[in-house]
Amino acid sequence: MINVFLLLALVVFVVLYWRWQHIQNLLWARKYKEITLSQPDRQVLLQYMPIYRAMTDADRVALERHVAWFLGEKRILGRDGLRVNRAMELIVAADACLLVLNQSWPLYPNVKEVLLYPSSYYVPQTSQDAAGLVNYHTSVRQGESWPGGTLVLSWHDVLEGNRLPGDGHNLVFHEFAHQLDQQTGQTNGTPQLPSKQDYADWARVFNRAYSNLKSHVAYQMPHVMHSYGATNEAEFFAVLTETFIEKPAQLRDYDPELYRLLMRYFKFDPAQWQRY
Ligand SMILES: [Zn+2]
């Protein structure tokens, strides 16, 4: 008799393990069925997030659903005395969820928390010079994305990124793009892709575009992307994500093949949103 119970328990465990993502999605669908953004929430996004204003109604509904889920499943915590209010949570979550607008839950499965500082913050650092001497200094940061699932953001820069929606700078897009990159276990500018063919296409187009930016920066020639993208492949992907969403028409005109690659990955076309 005990053996039958053990066998039954084993079967239940295997089924739960095998179908866990499916079961969790069903539970979330129930949990968030009634939870959506209120009218005051929408007013916050309309006021502070020009891209939200510019989106189609269908995209806005998809984004609101993601924002409700994100705020239910992730923590946003203040640092250095910053008291996080509902408006701050909404703006951070909406920017983060925009990148994964047409992806299904769980969004950013590795992310557990977002730490918000009032503005740029100092990080103690050590470096070693050629003689082996260790130097202690501090560096100023606006944001970080840790592979372990924590993001750090300067609230001042989050607001600035939204206030100027067409300049190719948005701190939340940048740091959450790093999270998409880091989901593979590596930080190399290549996010998770559905097939071998996608990886081959990505490598070809991405490497060509990265070399193009590097040569423009080396010769101090203007480019649709900010020069920081030439730092390394990971920064290129993060800056490219900011450019794709904030300067879509310019990027599409400059490099149509790269733009198509990004549309295939992100599953939306920001050029279709009415510009602000
Ligand atoms: Zn970066």
Image (cartoon, grey):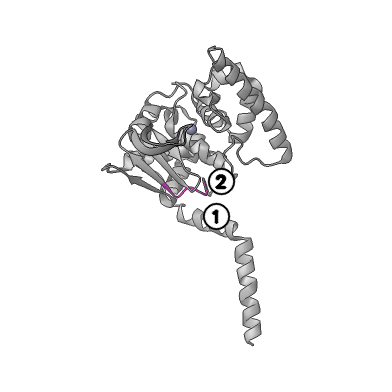
x%, y% of residue 49? 39, 30
Q: Which amino acid lies under the numbered mark 2 shown in the image of this protein?
A: Ser
Residue 142 falls in image quadrant: top left
* Residue lying at 47% horizontally and 47% vertically, measured from the top left: 149
* Residue lying at 38% horizontally and 34% vertically, measured from the top left: 45
Cβ at disc 2 under 8 Å from ligand 1:
no
In this picture, residue 198 sits left or right of residue 237: right
* Residue lying at 58% horizontally and 20% vertically, measured from the top left: 214
What secondary structure is the magenta-colored segment mainly?
Answer: loop
- Does the magenta portion include 72? no
User: Which circle's residue, 2 or 1, is located before the other in the chain?
Assistant: 1
Residue 48 falls in image quadrant: top left
Q: Are marks 2 and 1 in contact (CB under 8 Å)?
A: yes
* Residue lying at 56% horizontally and 44% vertically, measured from the top left: 183
x%, y% of residue 123? 37, 38
The quarter of the rendered structure image containing the N terminus is bottom right
Q: Which residue is mark 2?
A: 104
What is the span of residues highlighted in magenta in the rendered image? 107-113
Q: Which amino acid lies under the numbered mark 1 shown in the image of this protein?
A: Asn
The quarter of the rendered structure image containing the C terminus is top left
Q: Is 20 situated above or below 47?
A: below
Q: Which residue is mark 1?
A: 25
